[in-house]
Image (tube, rainbow, N blue to C red):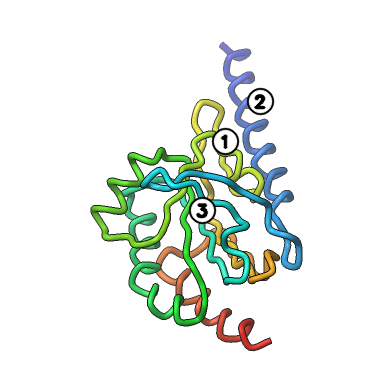
Amino acid sequence: MKLVILALVLAAGVVVWNNFARAADTPKEGEAAPDFSLPDQNGTVHTLNEFRGKWLVLYFYPKDDTPGCTQQACTFRDDLHQLSAMGAQVVGVSVDDSASHADFARKYHLPFPLLADQNGEIAERYGSILNLGIVKFAKRNTFLINPQGKVVKVYLKADTANNSKQVIEDLKVLATK
């Protein structure tokens, strides 16, 4: 029995260590944003390159149709006019599939792409994956990417209620530079 408990504690420690180690892989401000190519809720594939020349708000979230993820998505939806006026586009990413994203987008009238990163590869490139062994979730991180494709702001453990407002405030400053 003691060996089983010890093995479970060690396994949990490895999972925690791996997740902390991946945080070090989060792109830093000033670095080129990692490329991606993923389908959205309608099956349309989006790449980082298609957003060149525009500001991109790339936000990772854990799960469609959960309270925090819904709040965050709806605040981006509600602020989309202001973000668009500033030249920014919003894109959400989670490990849910396109069908789940389609239901989520339809239910909450989300007018921006929700990318399906089912294997978590892109979330991992952005240091935004929580791998619990048998299940993966995207961490709630947001990246503001400039028109040249560089990460200019990183919001780790983004606040679901204020993430959109934080991005808008930072865009006001960054877009004038």
Please, what secondary structure does the residue beneath circle 1 have?
Answer: strand
- Amino acid on which the number 1 mark rests in the picture: Asn
Q: Which image quarter holds the N terminus?
A: top right
Counting other residues with Cα less than 10 Å from the Cα at mark 1, is it few (<14), some (14-19), or many (20 or more)?
A: some
- Residue most extreme to the left: 107
As drawn, is 156 to the left or to the right of 112?
right
N-terminal of the two: label 2 or label 1? 2
Disc 2 from disc 3: Cα separation: 29 Å
Counting other residues with Cα less than 10 Å from the Cα at mark 2, is it few (<14), some (14-19), or many (20 or more)?
A: few
- Residue most extreme to the bottom: 176
Task: Write down the residue under mark 2.
Answer: 10
Residue 20 falls in image quadrant: top right
Residue situated in front as seen by the camera: 152 or 21: 152
Q: In front of the other: label 1 or label 3?
A: 3
Name which residue lies at 54% across and 33% down.
132
Name which residue lies at 23% across and 53% down.
107
Is the residue 122 above or below the residue 133 in the image? below
- Amino acid on which the number 2 mark rests in the picture: Leu
Please, what secondary structure does the residue beneath circle 2 have?
Answer: helix
Q: Which image quarter holds the C terminus?
A: bottom right
User: In the image, which disc is placed on residue 131?
Assistant: 1
Disc 1 from disc 3: Cα separation: 14 Å
Counting other residues with Cα less than 10 Å from the Cα at mark 3, is it few (<14), some (14-19), or many (20 or more)?
A: many
Task: Write down the residue under mark 3.
Answer: 60
N-terminal of the two: label 2 or label 3? 2
Is the residue 96 above or below the residue 143 in the image? above
Whether residues under marks 2 and 1 lie with C-beta atoms below 8 angstroms apart, the answer is no
